[in-house]
Amino acid sequence: MTPLTVDKLPSLDKAALFFDIDGTLAPIAAHASQVYIDESMLTTIRLLHRATEGALAVLSGRPIEQIDRLFSPYKYPAAAEHGALVRDPDGVTHTESHLAAHLDQIYRRALDAVRLMPGVHVEQKHHGVALHYRQAPRYERAVIQVANTLVALAPGIEATRGKMVVELKSATVNKGVAMQSLLSHAPFHDRIPVVFGDDMSDEPAFMQANRLNGLSISIETQASCAQHYVPRQHGLEQLLSDWLCGQAS
Ligand SMILES: [Mg+2]
């Protein structure tokens, strides 16, 4: 990975932008409900959306209503829950996951399995279940074990690890597939994908961007298939502002 500088970025009228939220646009908080995106970053995103003529999407593990709350009042094209639900640029949503029939059972079994692990939080999403252990990192191994057991409850489920979280979701769903789906629509079509993320769940989107001769940018310097990195949110925001300013001149 090499540091990203603004001269490596394509012109905004040729770029399609994809942003993760947690750890990328917003700092990680003790609890997912405490996360917010800085006002200045929100403004930058809005200006980038305009400068790309709408070719800007959010790729997140969060449910769609949480994404919309964080960007309120704007509703950007998005892949929610790692791509289990995709909202196209025209606002139409479609679901790519088929776990719904098993979700209640997985959720109940997960709650039961962690009842003696104080601080572990089980989140029921529309298309998956997340086991958060940020407030109880000592249970990491136990939580991973629980997730691996729950995978057997229905066909086509996988357990994927993120930062202090293990998610149970449809194995066919990931941010790379969701990004490809968004790229088939105008105004994303025929543009150079530029992906920003920070976590293991962003790797499929990084790989997809690399395959399409786009850019993959991590907000971390850890092992990743991202081509470039930027240091933390402050570095990212500075870079995005410079990118916008370059277009205006
Ligand atoms: Mg993230």
Image: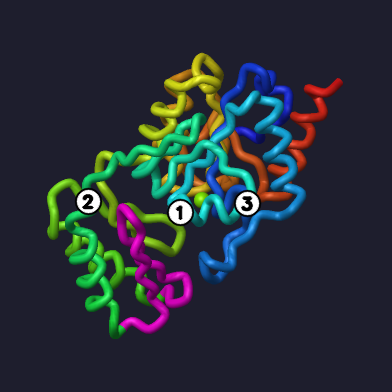
Helix, strand or loop for disc 3:
loop
Q: CA distance from mark 2 to mark 1?
A: 16 Å
The answer to whether 43 is drawn above or below residue 104 in the figure is: above
Q: Quadrant of the N terminus?
A: top right
Q: Amino acid at mark 2?
A: Leu
Q: Is residue 63 left or right of residue 195?
A: left
Q: CA distance from mark 2 to mark 3?
A: 29 Å
Helix, strand or loop for disc 2:
loop
**Residue nearest the observer in this picture, 71 or 173:** 71
Compare marks 2 and 1 and give the one earlier in the sequence: 1
Q: Is residue 182 left or right of residue 109?
A: right
| Mark 3 vs ligand 1: CB below 8 Å | no
Q: Is residue 24 magenta?
A: no
> Which labelled disc corresponds to residue 99?
2
Q: Which residue is mark 3?
A: 72
Q: Amino acid at mark 3?
A: Ser
